[in-house]
Amino acid sequence: MPHVDAEMAAPIAMGAGGLVETAYAKVNLALHVRHRRADGYHALESLFVFAEHGDLVSGHSRQDGVLDLQLQGPFGPALDSGGDNLVLKAARALQAFIGEERGASLVLTKYLPVASGIGGGSADAAAVLRLLTRLWNVAIGQAALGRIALSVGSDVPACLSSVTQMVQGRGELLERRTVEGLDGAPMLLVNPGLGVSTARVFAGWDQVDRGPLDARNMEQLIIDGRNDLEAAAIIEAPVVAEVLAVLKSCAGVRMTRMSGSGATCFALFDTESHRASAAVAVRGAHPGWWVAETRIRAA
């Protein structure tokens, strides 16, 4: 597992001769699975927050209509740059929707681990939608852009704005939220060095509806919030339980949970000093784990 903490991308607006967007890492502070819908999707209730850091998507316009993608960064080799890549899928969906004749040469610098529960692919797709609307000077409403995003993936609409929000349904119902104490909160992300199958984790959910998510304040999130996929993820990857135990043992922890369908887990801390000490301890005890020190992105 590459050690990439110091290299994680900070937000920047412009590259040399092109445009750059940050694909902010998504974290589910709580994820309640309510039921399976008639269309086969699961009805979810989740509070999404976003880290200040993530992958980078950059691009230059081209006149021949071609969309091409290069992959780089520590986790670039783990992805395929073909048509199934969500970045290209999102780019083609936007191009088709607006009838755009120009193309783009895109570069994805992958700092976030793949299939890790922090929305890397969805965030990358949302970032390329933001980038191309700027690169091509597209006039498109947020509702239309949201529909394009949803056609690419359930988490992509929320990643368009990358702000704290309640997400319901399959990802189409979004409500921006302000929860006191979250903006700028020190956060540690830890992945034990493996990806897990989202489909397998959802298939392993016990189908028990344990009630709605109350995300009015931090106390409710800590006491009543949960990730209903944790148990299934631990069956798929028992090391997730170890990651959670390690984070819970750190000093100054306010909350720790698994994000999404795993295997990345997170901890929120009282202070950046507590987070830094925890990061040193985790890296020292588990040098093969991916560890990222960041903060919750302010709305």
Image (tube, helix red, strand yellow):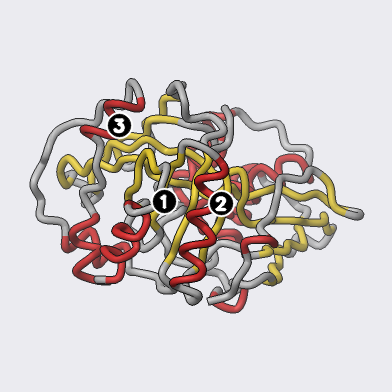
Q: Is residue 268 left or right of residue 89?
A: left
Q: Position of residue 43 (x, y in %)?
A: 23, 41
Secondary structure under the numbered disc 2 in the rendered image: helix
Residue shown at the point (34%, 63%) measured from the top left: 243
Which quadrant of the figure contains the C terminus? top right
Q: Position of residue 148 (x, y in %)?
A: 52, 43
- Binning the other alpha carbons within 10 Å of mark 2 as few (below 14), some (14 to 19) or many (20 upward) gives some
Residue at mark 1: 266
Q: Earlier in the sequence, mark 1 or mark 2?
A: 1
Q: Position of residue 150 (x, y in %)?
A: 44, 44
Q: Are marks 3 and 1 in contact (CB under 8 Å)?
A: no
Secondary structure under the numbered disc 1 in the rendered image: strand
Q: Is residue 210 visible?
A: yes
Q: Nearer the viewer, residue 153 or 268?
A: 268
Which residue type does callout 1 highlight? Phe
Residue shown at the point (60%, 28%) measured from the top left: 141
Q: Is residue 201 left or right of residue 152?
A: left
- Binning the other alpha carbons within 10 Å of mark 1 as few (below 14), some (14 to 19) or many (20 upward) gives many
Q: Nearer the viewer, residue 177 or 155?
A: 177
**232 over 11 or under it: above or below:** below
Residue shown at the point (23%, 58%) measured from the top left: 202
What is the distance, in whole Å, between disc 3 and disc 1 at their CAs?
14 Å
Which residue type does callout 3 highlight? Leu
Quarter of the rendering containing residue 222: top left
Q: Find residue 221 and name its label.
A: 3
Q: Is residue 132 left or right of residue 177?
A: right
